[in-house]
Amino acid sequence: MAKEIVRTDKAPQAIGPYSQGVRAGGFVFFSGQIPLDPLTGQITGTDSVEQAEQVMKNIEAVLSAAGLGFEDVVKTTIFLVDLADFAAVNEVYGRRFPEEPPARSTVEVKGLPRGSRVEIEVVAFSG
């Protein structure tokens, strides 16, 4: 079984030695997305809602590059610098998973890259 790297210029480029996504077997593992604008490479949004919206757009772009959509996501992990942002981020997140949402973990962390307030990583099943 060979692995396949997933890339797109419609989502932020990696800011370190990692891939946007890796297909292995029937799964695609996606690196965490922070609220970077894919064109400028700068953080967008000043609050958790605006930042979560950009994160979900970035996730949609890498899913699309792999020929997948939110309906194919089986596991997510949400990283927040302040758990008080949970309800607001959950509202943005929940709109992408109206039925049969994936398994999920949410973790409060001390900090995230580039000072972002939220990062989300996903794993999708590609059959």
Image: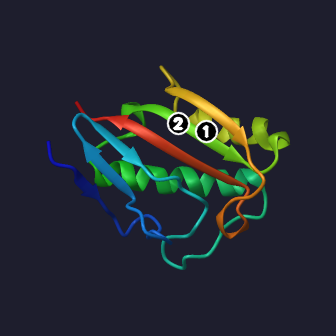
Q: Which colour scheme is used?
A: rainbow
SS class of the residue under badge 1?
A: helix
Residue 93 horizontal side relative to residue 20, left or right: right
Label annotation for residue 76:
2
Whole-angstrom CA distance, mark 2 to mark 1, is 10 Å
- Which corner quadrant holds the N terminus? top left
Q: Looking at the picture, does residue 88 appear above or below residue 105? A: below
Question: Between 119 and 10, which is closer to the camera in this rendering?
Answer: 119
For this orientation, the residue located farthest to the left is: 1
87 with respect to 16 (left or right): right
Identify the residue shown where x is 26% and y is 57%.
Answer: 5
Where residue 45 appears, as percent x and y from the top left, is 71, 64
In the rendering, which numbered label is found on residue 70? none
Given this view, does label 2 or label 1 mark the residue nearer the observer?
Answer: 2
Q: Residues within 10 Å of mark 1 (few under 14, many from 20)?
A: some
How crowded is the residue under tag 2: few (<14 C-alpha within 10 Å), some, or many (20+)? some
Side of 47 where 34 appears, left or right: left
The three-letter code of the residue at mark 1 reads: Tyr
Residue 82: % across, % down? 82, 47
Of the pair 16 and 64, the residue shown nearer to us: 16
Give coordinates of residue 37: x percent, y percent.
Answer: 55, 70
Residue that carries the numbered disc 1 in the rendered image: 93
Nearer the N terminus, badge 2 or badge 1?
2
Q: Nearer the viewer, residue 17 or 22?
A: 17
27 or 69: which is nearer to us? 27
Q: Is mark 2 on a helix, strand or loop?
A: strand
Q: Measuring 30% from the left and 55% from the top, which residue is drawn there?
A: 65
User: Residues at badges 2 and 1 in contact (C-beta under 8 Å)?
Assistant: yes
